[in-house]
Image (cartoon, helix red, strand yellow):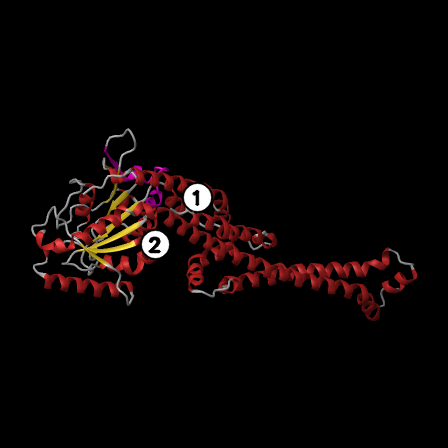
């Protein structure tokens, strides 16, 4: 059943859109140059800042994804059935103003800079050929896109898809403001790809607050006992897949449009309506999702800069040690070198300090002090650039954790994501100039952004 947008909803959507554009301009100005400077990709962030709110539907091929889409749109739009009917990722949204409904192939989607799907191109032609957009005139899609995914398979028995399915799910889940995982009573979470998605893919790609679980087609249970057993099985499987002791809420739903036992299931109509309203309210999560992702990316950037600042600070200490060695060498050359040479070989006839004290110094008296000082400086330089700094760099590459303070689980998780980038930056340029980059100035900019500007946008959330 389609829910038309009211005037209030339209006004709120416009406010959210304007705020999204403002955040996008601010992030592009303040953060993107630093992302590029520190070799942190910002493609995921760009994708989230683009376009409209997204709901991603996941589940095995008989879980009712397409049926749910048809209900939301109020029309038979997606093909349905208990056997696989569609093996493509289908982006469903409204046509642009003045355009007719149409189908757009994946090759167009991944090359359209106005759309957030460019990252999917990296998964190859096989995926692109199984990607499409279908536009349909439906009020709920004016500020929403729904992605209907291929049914998940048991990878132990099914043939390979020809592309990294889990990787695609991860990319789409990062963009999505809401991820809906649908199960049916006959396959309550036992599909291999479902296990992998819930256990490994979604926790990294999407926050728990953006994932909704639902068991559909409950009208196919013969009696209440069958429904309870199916629900219990799903709860058990979810506990194993999520690794959590507490079970997330599982909506129970069905489609009155196809059910023959609607009257017996009227008790579930309210919950079914709640699930639909939660999906239709996904646009309200958009700004929160964007700010959470910007916050996460900014903290990753800050940790990279913090590590590089520590690397450079400790590296400059190696230079200070070398300078101290040069000064000691110069002092030795000035005060003792000519004395030692005179004692060993009888040269020079006059030492530098005595001639300096009497004011009878000439160029010949400077030969040994200058030569000794130059030799000390050259040896210190060679020691620094050929041994001390390379050894320091190797130690930092091997023990990168020493460059940051990891006191909380959040910091440890952030560091796990960016540690490779820090190693790459350390290994790129090991020259002396790299130790004098103003990382501290950059770190101050990022921290100021998080504490002041980003916090201000949180306070403006609708």
Q: Secondary structure beneath disc 1? A: helix
Magenta segment: 101-121
The relative height of residue 121 versus residue 351 in the rendered view (above or below) is above
Identify the residue at the far front of this view: 8
Q: Please provide percent x and percent y for residue 208.
A: 32, 57
The question of residue 117 being in magenta is answered with yes
- Between 109 and 384, the residue placed more toward the observer is 109
**Left or right of residue 392: residue 67:** left
User: Which dot marks residue 23?
Assistant: 1
Do we see residue 162 in this rendering? no
The question of residue 454 being in magenta is answered with no
The relative height of residue 1 versus residue 377 in the rendered view (above or below) is above
Residue beneath disc 2: 205
**Left or right of residue 76: residue 357:** right
At x 35%, y 42%, the residue is 118
User: Which dot marks residue 147?
Assistant: none
The relative height of residue 388 versus residue 21 in the rendered view (above or below) is below
At x 46%, y 55%, the residue is 299
Q: Residues within 10 Å of mark 2 (few under 14, many from 20)?
A: some
Mark 1–mark 2 Cα distance, whole angstroms, equals: 21 Å
At x 43%, y 43%, the residue is 23
Q: Please provide percent x and percent y for residue 391.
A: 57, 63
Do we see residue 101 in this rendering? yes
Q: Secondary structure beneath disc 2? A: helix
- Between 201 and 124, the residue placed more toward the observer is 201
Q: Residues within 10 Å of mark 1 (few under 14, many from 20)?
A: many
Identify the residue at the far bottom of this view: 343
**Left or right of residue 281: residue 424:** right
- Between 404 and 372, the residue placed more toward the observer is 404
Quarter containing the N terminus: top left
Give the mark nearer the N terminus: 1 vs 2. Answer: 1
- Between 359 and 26, the residue placed more toward the observer is 26
């Amino acid at each position: 059943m389609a829910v038309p947008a009211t005037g209030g909803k339209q006004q709120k959507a416009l406010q959210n859109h304007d705020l999204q554009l403002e955040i996008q301009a601010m992030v592009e100005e303040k953060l993107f140059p630093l992302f590029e400077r520190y070799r942190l990709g910002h493609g995921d962030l760009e994708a989230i800042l683009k376009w409209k709110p997204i709901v991603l539907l996941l589940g095995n091929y008989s879980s009712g994804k397409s049926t749910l889409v048809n209900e939301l749109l109020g029309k038979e739009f997606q093909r349905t059935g208990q056997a696989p009917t569609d093996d493509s990722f289908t982006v469903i949204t409204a046509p642009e103003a003045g355009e007719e409904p149409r189908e757009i192939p994946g090759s167009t989607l991944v090359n359209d800079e106005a759309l957030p799907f460019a990252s999917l191109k990296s998964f190859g032609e096989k995926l692109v050929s199984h990607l499409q957009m279908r536009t349909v005139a439906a009020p709920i899609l004016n500020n929403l896109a729904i992605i209907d995914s291929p049914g998940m398979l048991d990878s132990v028995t099914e043939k390979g898809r020809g592309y990294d399915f889990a990787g695609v799910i991860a990319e789409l889940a990062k963009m999505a403001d809401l991820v809906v995982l649908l199960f049916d009573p006959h396959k309550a979470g036992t599909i291999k790809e479902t296990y992998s998605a819930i256990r490994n893919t979604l926790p990294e790609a999407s926050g728990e607050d953006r994932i909704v679980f639902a068991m559909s087609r409950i009208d196919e249970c013969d009696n209440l006992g069958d429904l309870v057993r199916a629900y219990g099985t799903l709860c058990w499987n979810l506990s194993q897949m999520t690794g959590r002791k507490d079970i997330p809420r599982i909506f129970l739903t069905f489609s009155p449009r196809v059910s023959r036992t609607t009257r017996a299931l009227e008790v579930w109509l309210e919950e079914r309506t709640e699930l639909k309203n939660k999906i239709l309210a996904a646009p309200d999560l958009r700004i929160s999702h964007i700010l959470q992702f910007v916050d996460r990316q900014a903290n990753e950037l800050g940790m990279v800069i913090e590590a590089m600042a520590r690397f450079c600070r400790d590296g400059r200490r190696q230079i200070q040690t070398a300078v101290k060695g040069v000064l000691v060498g110069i002092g030795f050359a000035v005060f003792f070198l000519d004395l030692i040479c005179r004692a060993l070989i009888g040269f020079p006839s006059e030492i530098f300090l005595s001639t300096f004290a009497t004011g009878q110094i000439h160029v010949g008296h400077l030969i040994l002090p200058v030569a000794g000082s130059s030799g000390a400086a050259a040896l210190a330089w060679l020691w620094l650039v050929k041994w001390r700094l390379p050894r320091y760099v190797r130690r930092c590459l091997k023990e990168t954790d020493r460059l940051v303070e990891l006191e909380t689980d959040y910091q440890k998780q952030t560091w796990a994501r960016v540690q490779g980038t820090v190693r790459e930056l350390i290994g790129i340029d090991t020259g002396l100039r790299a130790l004098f980059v103003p990382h501290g100035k950059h770190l101050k900019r990022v921290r100021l952004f998080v504490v002041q500007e980003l916090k201000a946008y949180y306070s403006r959330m609708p």
